[in-house]
Amino acid sequence: MSTTLPSPAVRPDGRKRAFLEVNDLRVHFPTADGVVKSVDGLSFELERGEILGIVGESGSGKSVTSLAILGLHKGSNAEVTGEIWLDGREIIAATEEEVRDLRGSEMGMIFQDPLSSLHPFYTVGAQISEAYLVHTKVSKKEARAEAIRMLEKVGIPNAPSRYNDYPHQFSGGMRQRAMIAMALICKPRLLIADEPTTALDVTVQAQILELIKQLHDELNSAVILITHDLGVVAETCDKVLVMYGGQCVETGPVDEIFYAPEMPYTWGLLRSMPRMDRDRQTRLTPIPGSPPSLINVPSGCVFNTRCPFTDRVDGDKCRTVHPNLEQGATPGHAVRCHIPAAQRQEIWLTEISPSL
Ligand SMILES: Nc1ncnc2c1ncn2[C@@H]1O[C@H](COP(=O)(O)OP(=O)(O)OP(=O)(O)O)[C@@H](O)[C@H]1O
Ligand code: SF4
Ligand SMILES: [Mg+2]
């Protein structure tokens, strides 16, 4: 084992660490059928004030990644390796207690199903106050007042009386708002929202996203937004990370990913989802085939079993050599594909973009 501890402030290459830095994250689950490699070598950075969208098909490792950042795999059978730095503190090596401290004070989370975060036996208000009391030195009365202020802020009508309601007395949209109030009451500097609006109707979805953006502006927080909705990503995020088979296959500024993507899987995603910025009704084309096994991950490029462009690469490289994540057209844009950069850009412009 190495005896040199990594520095909290500086990366091995001498650069200052980002606010959130994920380095070579692997989350593997040993099962009776074999080891499930849910996340396999994921690296990315996020600064305060930035919103990162993580997109990818079901099972690509998005939620497992967010749970790792929140330290929620601790105590489970998950084998987690790599480094996750949050403001100079490393989460994977930290104890459960240290991470519990960070959650709530430094990190807030909003999940798809608020019932999994709200306890059915306690009132909504008591749970929000409790979240505040755990991390701040205030009286119960002050915590109650702050919780009511927060409920008002997220748009719960009659907040002082709704404070005493139990979660089942709230509608789905109100529960989601209550969870946002609970996530934000401690002013987290990192907010992770995992499909925060999927179960809600379109109007409530828009309100919730507006709320996340507003609170992000106020607190200058870093936000990770996981969603299946590329329209939401286009409207909300600064950067995008495309996940496939537990790996990052493309990442970059949001405009690059939407208007100059370079990875065949991203092209497939864009073709399979509606585009709000196009007038004409275009036919949506699902990506043929199904996501790869995470137990027997394909050798070579993880997308090779479904990729229609393997004939653009010499020999059998797509099936035998794992492509590195390399810089795309601009710095900050990274792509995992063997097709040379200039050729990828040409394919996008001449073959893919016109058909969208
Ligand atoms: N505890 C576990 N044991 C074994 N496999 C697991 C475990 N948790 C997650 N997985 C597997 O890891 C893979 C990634 O799961 P994850 O929940 O991160 O997907 P996701 O990208 O969030 O998908 P979705 O869009 O459906 O939410 C899936 O194949 C899932 O079955
Ligand atoms: S490396 Fe090969 S299989 Fe992978 S995306 Fe590029 S062309 Fe397709
Ligand atoms: Mg998920």
Image (cartoon, rainbow, N blue to C red):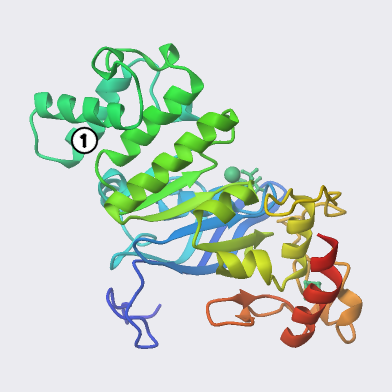
Q: Is residue 111 above or below residue 32?
A: above
Q: Quadrant of residue 149?
A: top left
Residue 289: % across, % down: 86, 53
Which one is in front, 286 or 64?
Answer: 286
Which one is in front, 254 or 64?
Answer: 254
Q: Residue furthest front?
A: 279
Relative horizontal placement of residue 31, taking residue 282 as reference (left or right): left
Identity of the residue drawn at 82% across and 51% down: 290
Q: Is residue 45 above or below residue 205?
A: below
Q: Quadrant of the N terminus?
A: bottom left
What is the number of callouts on the image?
A: 1
Which one is in front, 207 or 92?
Answer: 207
Which amino acid is tagged 1?
Tyr
Query: What residue would you read off at disc 1?
Result: 132
- The residue carrying pointer 1 sits among few (fewer than 14), some (14 to 19) or many (20 or more) residues within 10 Å by Cα, namely many
Say which element carries label 1. helix
Residue 137: % across, % down: 9, 39
Residue 62: % across, % down: 58, 52
Q: Is residue 325 above or below residue 67?
A: below
Residue 141: % across, % down: 10, 24
Can residue 147 be seen in this snapshot?
yes
Ligand 3 resides in the quarter of the picture at: top right
Which one is in front, 321 or 94?
Answer: 321
Q: Quadrant of the C terminus?
A: bottom right
Can residue 304 be seen in this snapshot?
no
Identity of the residue drawn at 52% across and 37% down: 206
Identity of the residue drawn at 15% across and 29% down: 143
Relative horizontal placement of residue 231, taking residue 306 as reference (left or right): left
